[in-house]
Image (cartoon, coloured by chain):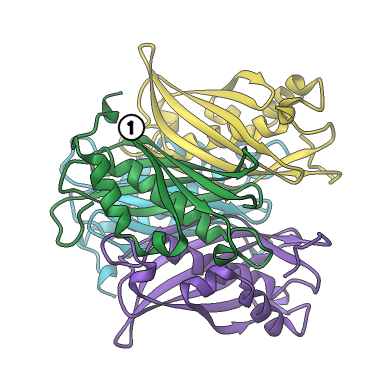
Chain colours: A yellow, B cyan, C purple, D green
C-alpha cells in the first residue's frame, strides 16, 4: 500500500528521538520495541508504580502506551518537519491488565493528509503467553510548520 | 436526583483510601481535590515528568486523571463492598494541555445497576484562568463480590 | 463566548436547506425543532419503521439524529461556503430508546479552525416526561472550497 | 478459539429472524450477506434515501448497519434465550461513503459473560473495487431472562 511508504527515510531515528523526549514514557518506564512503516510497538513492565487500586495496570497507563504507539505509527508515515498530535482516542478494556509486561502494537489504518486513523492492540504477557487486554482507536493530526510542534 | 444519594455514607474515606492505592496517581503526582456524591475532582501539576514530546502534558496522563475522576465519581454512588472497573472510555483533546496544572472534573451522567456512564472535563489552569483541554466519557462497571476487586 | 457568534447571519436558513437535502432524515421522518448559534435540536417519532428487534428505536437511528444535530450545531458557527463532515463520533446508550418521540439536542463544546467538538444529548419523551437515553460526542471537520461539499 | 463456538446451533436462523424484526434495516433497505460464528456481514445500497447533504451515505446509516453487524456477530455466540443490546459504539469515518453499495463486516474481538467487544469495518464498493470508509468498535451486552429482550 502506498500509504505505508515512509516519506522520511530516517523515520526510525526521528521516532526514537521524539519518544525519548516524552517525559511520561520515561516516568512510566516504557520503551520502544519495534518500528516499521506504519507500525510501532511499545512495552511497559507491570509494577506497583503504574497500578490502579486492585493491583492491575491502571487504564491510564494502558492508554498512555497505546496512544504513543498509535501516534508514532502515524508519525512514521509523515514528512520531515511535520508533527503529530492526538485529537481523540477511545479504548476498550477487555481484560484486567495483569501479567509481567504489556505490549502495545500500534498500526496505521488510514493515513490522510490532515488526519490519520490508527489502532493499537495491547497484550499482557505472562510466562510467554499473550492475552489481549485492550483495543484503542485514535485520530492523529498532522501539524505542519508550527513552532514547537515537530515530530 | 435519587441516583446521587450515596449508598455508603463513608464514601469519601473509601474513595481516598482507594485512590491512595493507585500507584499510577502517586507516580504522576496527582491528588484528589474534592469529593461529592457523583462528583470527584483530581489535580495534576504540569511538569516534564508527565510530558509528551512537545512539552505539553501527555494525552495518556490527561486520560489517566480523567479516567480516575470518572471512576471515583461512579464509585461514590456504589454500595459498600462493590468495586469499580473501567470498561471503556473516549477522550477528545481540544487544546494542548499546557499551563501550571490540570484539573479533571468527573461527573456521573447515569448510574445503572451494572454500568455507569460518567463524563470528565479536564481544564488547564494558568494564572488563575481555566481553559477546557479535554472531554472524556467513560463506562464504569460495578463489580460485586469478586476477590481482590473492591473499591 | 466569541465562538458562539455565527459568521454567517443566514445560518438558520442555510442549515434548514442542508437538512432538507439529507435523504436519510426524510426517510426516518426526522425534523429540526430549533436552531441557535452552536445549538440544533432534531426530533424523531418512535415508530416500527425505525425500530430494532425488541421494538425500541434502533441505536443507528438514535445515532443518526444525534450526529445530524451535532453536525448542524457545528455548521451554525462556520463561515458561508464551508461544509461540515463528521470524522468520528461515539455514542453511549444509557436507556432503551422507548417513548413517543426522541429529541436530540446538539451543542458545540469547542469550535476550532479545522475541527469542532460537539456533544448531543438524546431524550425520549413519554406523556410530557423526558428521559436521557443517549449521549454522543462528535468531531466535525470544516471543509473549505471543495467541490460538492458545502454546508 | 473457544469463544467462537456458537452455543446455539440454530444461530443463523435466529439472527436472520431477529434482523427481519429490525424495522430500521427494512426502511434503509439493508440485508444480511453472510453469517458465521462471531462474524456477520450486512449490505446497504447507496441511494438518495440514505444520503446526507452532499450525496454521500449519511454517517448515521453507515453507523446503523455497522452497529447491526457488530450486534449480530456478538449474538451468534450467545446462548438461546439471551438478547443483545448495544451499550456504546464509536465510529471513525475515514472516507466519504460513496459508491454503489456499502458492506459492513462485523467481527467479535472478545466475547465475555456480560460484555462483548466487536469491531466492524465498512467498505464501499464501486465497480468491484472495495475501499474502507469506516471503522466501528462496539460494546454489546448479553441480556438474560428479560421480558421482551431476546435475540
Tell me which corner region of the image, top left, top right, bottom left or bottom right, holds residue A106.
Answer: top right
Residue at 60% of width from left, 27% of height from top?
A26
Residue at 69% of width from left, 77% of height from top?
C4
* Image height of A151 relative to A33, above or below: below
Residue A149 located left or right of residue C136: right
Residue B151: x %, y % from top left = 26, 46
**In this view, which residue lies farthest toward the top?**
A128
* Image height of D68 relative to D7, above or below: below
Residue D96: x %, y % from top left = 66, 52
Quadrant showing the N terminus of chain D = top left
Residue A113 located left or right of residue C31: right
Residue C96: x %, y % from top left = 30, 65
- From the image, tell me which residue sits under label 1: A55
From the viewer's side, name the closer residue of D50 and C5: D50
Residue at 18% of width from left, 39% of height from top?
B146
User: Label 1: how many residues lie within 10 Å, few (<14), some (14-19) or many (20+)?
Assistant: many
Amino acid at each position: 500500500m502506498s500509504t505505508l511508504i515512509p516519506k522520511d527515510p530516517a523515520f526510525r531515528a526521528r521516532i526514537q528521538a521524539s519518544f525519548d523526549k516524552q517525559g511520561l514514557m520515561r516516568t512510566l518506564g516504557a520503551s520502544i520495541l519495534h518500528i516499521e512503516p506504519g507500525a510501532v510497538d511499545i512495552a511497559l513492565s507491570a509494577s506497583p508504580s503504574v497500578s490502579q487500586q486492585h493491583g492491575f495496570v491502571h487504564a491510564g497507563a494502558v492508554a498512555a502506551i497505546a496512544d504513543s504507539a498509535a501516534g508514532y505509527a502515524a508519525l512514521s508515515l509523515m514528512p520531515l518537519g511535520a508533527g503529530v498530535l492526538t485529537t481523540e482516542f477511545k479504548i476498550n478494556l477487555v481484560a484486567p491488565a495483569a501479567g509481567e509486561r504489556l505490549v502495545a502494537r500500534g498500526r496505521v489504518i488510514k493515513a490522510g493528509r490532515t488526519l490519520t486513523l490508527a489502532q493499537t492492540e495491547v497484550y499482557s504477557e505472562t510466562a510467554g503467553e499473550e492475552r489481549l487486554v485492550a483495543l484503542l482507536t485514535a485520530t492523529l493530526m498532522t501539524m505542519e510548520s508550527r513552532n514547537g510542534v515537530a515530530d
